[in-house]
Amino acid sequence: MDKLRIDRRWLPLNALRAFEAVAKHGSFTAAGHALLVSQSALSRHVLSLEKLIGAALFERRPHALVLTKAGEHLLPAVTKSFDRLEYAIDDIRHDGAPTLRTLRVQMPPSFAMHVAVPILREFRRANAEVDIDLISPYDIGPAQADADIAVVYSKPTVTNLVSDLLWPEQLGILCHPDLAARHAGLDLPSVIQANELIHVRLTNLPRHHLWSQFALQANLGLANVERGLVFDTAFLAVQYARSGEGLALVDLNLFAEDVASGRLVQPFPNRLDGGFGYYLTIHPEALSDTAIALFRSWLISRFGPAAAHDETVIRLAASNDA
């Protein structure tokens, strides 16, 4: 028999607020100080909530509290629900006057530094009432629980989130123009053998994963690609390549401007589809949030498939004019 749905009349708001505070601060003591409530009262609230839903929300370790899967599922919904209540009440209190709304936005470091941050001013000019709190973790995979909207670097996954593919990653070799000129006429294996390789580290994958995949697809045989420098971000890898040394295997879409400007060149046409891409993700209930909807629409218009198609058409037109 299916379990009965919880009637909203009996939603334990104090227990939900206690759960959110404990999850945010990582301990009952710190949460109690923040809410001016005793630790024992918070503990009772959380226990009553766990009893109601029939699942533990925290794994209680000797020196830490860790969210369980049930806790990870519940926390974003609780946080965003309280956020929307807060914003609605503020709107009423200010009698419809525009209030500053802060969006917590997550982006991968290279995406943020190289393409998003330089143009964020455009969004802020058009939406001055929306402030941005930008976070840039290095991990591959899902967004942090407290992010309102996130661009994540990951492989395609099935989740309960609304996900928009901004672009699939296409990896290619980029290097300084002088380096390419010095090796003009040589084949790909010879150029790889003669130069330092620049790697981008991916969480939970071998240090040389991307170059190894590239070598396999390009049939490079016994070419030694497990050497060279390893960087935490593609942005740092490209910065090193700009200095004049090394071959960087990076996303050609992400660094298209470097190629267009001549700062870097792609000496060989070989490409690798590593299976990763940049995805814009939000929780379904956030679709009705005006600030989140504005930022989502702006990102899709700038970086989504339609934007990439428009940019290609413009470049082709400019090339034909030339």
Image (spheres, rainbow, N blue to C red):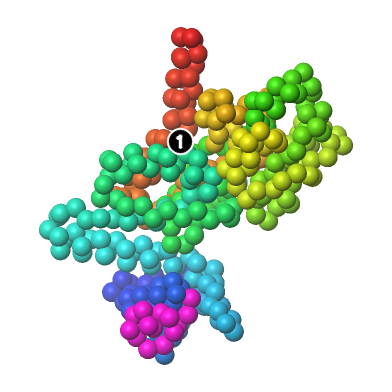
**x and y, in percent, of residue 105 in the image:** 42, 53
Tell me: residue 321, above or below residue 196. above
Q: Residue at x 39, y 35 (%)?
A: 301
Residue 316 in magenta? no
Occupied quadrant, residue 15 = bottom left
Q: Residue at x 57, y 28 (%)?
A: 263
Tell me: residue 99, above or below residue 31. above
**x and y, in percent, of residue 69 in the image:** 54, 68
**x and y, in percent, of residue 276 in the image:** 61, 43
- Amino acid tagged 1: Gly
Occupied quadrant, residue 4 = bottom left
**x and y, in percent, of residue 88 in the image:** 23, 61
Residue sticking out furthest to the right: 222
Residue sticking out furthest to the top: 321
Dominant secondary structure, magenta: helix
For residue 213, say whether it is visible: no
Q: Residue at x 66, y 46 (%)?
A: 200
Q: Residues within 10 Å of mark 1 (few under 14, many from 20)?
A: some
Near-viewer residue (292 or 236): 236
Instruction: Determine whether, in the image, residue 231 is placed left or right of residue 122.
Output: right
Instruction: Determine whether, in the image, residue 151 is placed left or right of residue 216.
Output: left
- Residue extent of the magenta highlight: 26-39
Q: Residue at x 48, y 9 (%)?
A: 322
What residue sits right under mark 1 in the picture? Answer: 304
Q: How many marks?
A: 1
